[in-house]
Image: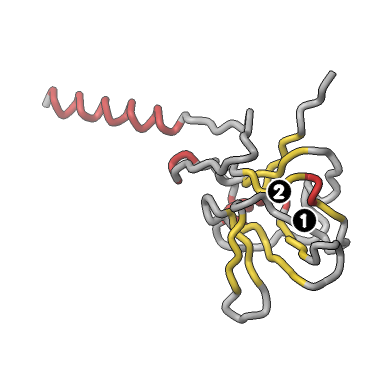
Amino acid sequence: MKSLNCLIILLAVFFSACAQKKSTVSAIATDTIIKNSPMEWNKLTPEESRVIVNKGTEYPGTGTLLNNKEKGTYICKRCNAPLYQSDSKFESHCGWPSFDDEMEGAVKRIPDADGLRTEIVCANCNGHLGHVFLGEGFTKKNTRHCVNSISMLFVPDKKVE
């Protein structure tokens, strides 16, 4: 009986310690993709899960990063992997943040089953970001990554004083 009680206490301590791990977004190395495991991914709200895990879409014009003009890096909300630099963001008036280039190796393209669109996901955790469109003529790169704000976090560049 004593060993069973000890085992239960040890398991309770172990699981409560794991549940307390907090993810932080500090000192991001933008030249490498973070290869963390699903146990280390950030906890998502139900709405974030609907978009990132279940491949949903946020309503156009509602995203918190749509009108962001600051310099910095956009990272995956699920795993903190760097995705886009602010200098690749442009105004497309589509209702979602638009980028004409991703960071090298950060985004995977997956053709939709209907063949009409191409989904983009985080190359590190496969979290749904949005869709990519080619040939629209918005920028010289002729590419538009239409990304859900809810799929990303923004890390501003450090200001030199």
**Whether residue 50 can be seen here:** no
The kind of secondary structure element at disc 2 is: strand
In this figure, which residue is indicated by the disc labeled 1? 99
Determine whether label 2 and label 1 are within 8 Å by CB. yes
Q: Quadrant of the C terminus?
A: top right
Which quadrant would residue 116 be assigned to in this image?
bottom right
Lateral position of residue 117 relative to residue 16, left or right? right
Q: Residue at x 80, y 54 (%)?
A: 62
Q: CA distance from mark 2 to mark 1?
A: 7 Å
Q: Residue at x 49, y 43 (%)?
A: 35
- The tag on residue 32 is none
In this figure, which residue is indicated by the disc labeled 2? 84
* Coloration mode: secondary structure
Q: Nearer the viewer, residue 19 or 65?
A: 65
Up the image or down, 160 lies above or below 122; here it is above
Disc 1 crowd rating (10 Å Cα; few below 14, some 14-19, many 20+) is: many
Identified by mark 1, the residue type is Phe
User: x, y percentage for residue 132?
Assistant: 70, 66
Identified by mark 2, the residue type is Tyr
Q: Nearer the viewer, residue 116 or 149?
A: 116
